[in-house]
Amino acid sequence: MSTLWTVPRMEPLTEYRLVSGPVVYGFLRLVRVSEARQEALIASLAEYCRSHELELSGVFTEREASAGPGSAAFTGLLDVLALPDVYGVLAPAASHLGPKAIAAERGRRIKAVGSRLLLVRRAHTACPPAASTAVARRHSPGTTSLLETES
């Protein structure tokens, strides 16, 4: 008696399949910003998502300078963060959440709903690291160039 063995069909690697990453929503604060700047910011969010395997599902835009922590755009963002399988919020920088006090409150609200806040650009530290790899040399008043140091 012979036995028929079947070989299971192999699935392609994920690199060759369309898989969606964690879902994020963008948030932009665009007060008196050109169309070109807006497009560049949205492109930076999309590129960040592409390089970090995230799925950008939408972008909420706030256009009023006087908008408080409960603006329509931010309230809409909080609504979608309550949906299942939403990973978090992506912004170009913390300043897109508003002035410091409003940004802090919005950060707390994002965390309170169980989401993460991802920033394309992190805040720069006030003091540069002690071991710098560049030396600044002043050539003339108002001009500074950076030269790499030799190791």
Image (cartoon, grey):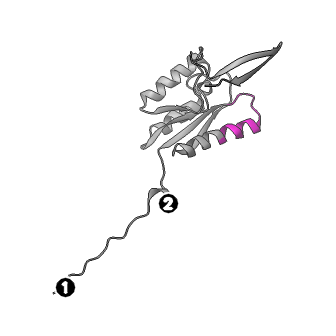
Give above or below for 68 relative to 80.
above
Percent x, y of residue 10: 38, 67
Tag 2 secondary structure = helix
Region in magenta: 30-43
Most foreground residue, 96 or 69? 96
Residue lying furthest front = 151
- The tag on residue 16 is 2
Does 67 sit left or right of 1 as displayed? right
Dot 1 amino acid type: Ser
Q: Which residue, given by chain and number where applicable, does mark 1 sit on?
A: 2
Most foreground residue, 130 or 39? 130
In the rendered image, residue 40 lying in the magenta stretch gets the answer yes
Most foreground residue, 105 or 4? 4
Give above or below for 88 relative to 71.
below
Percent x, y of residue 46: 61, 43
Dot 2 amino acid type: Tyr
